[in-house]
Each structure stands twice: as C-alpha cells, then as structure tokens.
Image (cartoon, rainbow, N blue to C red):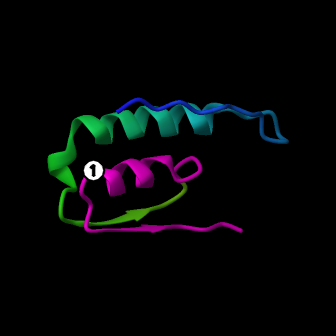
Amino acid sequence: MSIVIVGFIWPNGSRCRWNAAIAFASYLDRNEGIYASKNVLELGAGGGLPGIVASLNGARRVSPESST
C-alpha cells in the first residue's frame, strides 16, 4: 500500500502527529495479522490514517475517537 498525505501545519506549528501516523500506518500495513478480523479502537492517531489502513486490511470494525 502506498500512503501519500498532503501535509499541513497545525496552528501550533506541529507536524509530528502526521509523521507518527504515517509510521504507525506503515507498521500496521506490514503486520496485518495482529488486527485482522478484530475490533480496533483508534485513539488520537493522526487524522484517522492508521484506522483507515486497518479497515482496508481486514479489521472487523474500526471505531475512531473524535476530539471535536
């Protein structure tokens, strides 16, 4: 899977959330066996990217956290 994100800077100047999300999503993409056919709870994971990857790779259900 190829992940491309058009980045932006948060009002506080932070970008590290996106970098962490990309790294974690890549990890999940390489290790489908740890969550395939399981329920996934996503908490504060960089705009939902890891949850999207988990959902596309066979997670039974992904429940994202919403901080808005």
Q: Residue at the location (82% across, 40% down)?
A: 12
Q: Which stretch is magenta?
A: 45-68
Please indicate whether residue 34 sits to the left or right of residue 62 in the image: left
Q: Nearer the viewer, residue 6 or 39?
A: 6
Q: Quadrant of the N terminus?
A: top left
Instruction: Say above or below: 7 vs 42.
Output: above
Q: Quadrant of residue 9?
A: top right
Q: Residue at the location (40% across, 40% down)?
A: 25
Count of all numbered marks drawn on residues in the image: 1
Give the farthest residue toward the right: 11
Residue located beneath label 1 in the image: 57
Query: Is residue 50 in the magenta section?
Result: yes
Q: Residue at the location (22% across, 56% down)?
A: 35
Q: Quadrant of the C terminus?
A: bottom right
Q: Residue at the location (32% across, 35% down)?
A: 27
Residue 58 position, x and y percent, is 24, 57
Callout 1 amino acid? Asn
Please indicate whether residue 64 sits to the left or right of residue 39 in the image: right
